[in-house]
Image (cartoon, grey):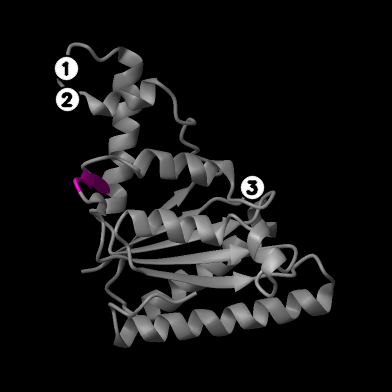
Amino acid sequence: MRKLLHIDSSILGTDSVSRQLTAQIVASWRAAHPATQVSYLDLAVDTPAHFSADAMGFRLPPSSDRLTDAQKRENALSEALVAQFLASDVVVIGAPLYNFSIPTQLKAWIDRVAQVGRTFKYTDKGAVGLAGGKTVIVASSRGGVYSTSEAGNAMEHQESYLKTIFGFFGVTDVRFVRAEGLAMGEAAKAAALAAAHAEILAHTQIAANQPQAVQAA
C-alpha cells in the first residue's frame, strides 16, 4: 500500500488556490491508486516552531543526559515530522509564492526534515541524498507571472528552492502543478486554473502508468 502525505501551507484557508489544487491532486491520485493511504498536515494550523538551538538537539542521542527538556520536546517534534516524511511514497505540497519565496510555515517544516543521517549525509565526495524513491508533487500558486522571462525566473525562489532542497534529499521525481497570474484579472486566473487542472490529470496519469517517471516541471 502506498502512503501519501498531503501538506498545505497557505494562510488563506478556503480562499487558497494552492489548497484547492492539492485537494484535486490528492483526489486524482487516489482515483488512480485507490489503495493509497493518505495523511494530512496543515502547516498553517500546526506550524512547527522555527528552527532554533533547541531544535538542533537531534544531533545528540535521544537518551543523552545532556539534552534539556526543551531539546527533548523539539526532538520529538522533529522526529515525528521526519519519520512521517520518510514513510511516505508520495508527498503533495501546497506552496504559494509569498514575497518571492515559500511560506515561513513550509520552511519551518523543511528545516525539521533536513537532518544529517536521515534525509542526507556528507561524504568525501560531497552531500548524498537519503530520501530518494519518492514522488513529490508541488501545487505552486502565484499572483504574477514568473515562468516566462529570465527576470521572472530570477525573482522566484519558490519552485527553484523546492526543486533544490528535495533534490538534495535525493528525490529526483519532483513535479510542479503551476497556477500563476492569479492576481492579473479574472480571465488570467481562469486560464491559469484550467492549465493547472490539465497538469494535474497529466501528472496523475503518469503516476498511474510510470510510478518512477522522470522529473517534470
Q: Earlier in the sequence, mark 1 or mark 3?
A: 3
Q: Is residue 39 visible?
A: no
Q: Is residue 44 left or right of residue 172?
A: right
Q: Position of residue 80 (x, y in %)?
A: 30, 39
| Residue linked to disc 3 | 11
**Residue that numbered label 2 is attached to:** 61
Q: Is residue 63 left or right of residue 212?
A: left
Crowdedness near tag 3: few (<14), some (14–19) or many (≥20) residues, C-alpha within 10 Å = some
Circle nearer the N terminus (3, 2): 3
User: Can the viewer see residue 124 in this picture?
Assistant: yes
Q: Residues within 10 Å of mark 1 (few under 14, many from 20)?
A: few
Going by the numbered disc 3, the residue's amino acid type is Ile
Q: Amino acid at mark 2?
A: Pro
Check disc 1 and give the amino acid type: Ser
- SS type, badge 3: loop
In percent of the image, x 75 and y 65: which residue is there?
144
Q: Is residue 173 left or right of residue 177?
A: left
| Mark 1 and mark 2: Cα distance apart in space | 5 Å
Image: magenta residue range: 119-124
Image quarter hosting the N terminus: bottom left
**Spatial CA span between label 3 and label 2:** 35 Å
Q: Which mark is residue 120?
A: none
Which secondary structure type mostly characterizes the magenta part of the structure?
Answer: strand
Q: Position of residue 134 (x, y in %)?
A: 29, 65
Disc 2: CA contacts within 10 A as few (<14), some (14-19) or many (>=20):
few
Membership of 137 in magenta stretch: no
Measure how far apart labels 1 and 3 are at the Cα level: 37 Å
> Does residue 200 sit above or below 127 in this rendering?
below
Residue projecting furthest to the front: 125
Q: Which residue is mark 1?
A: 64
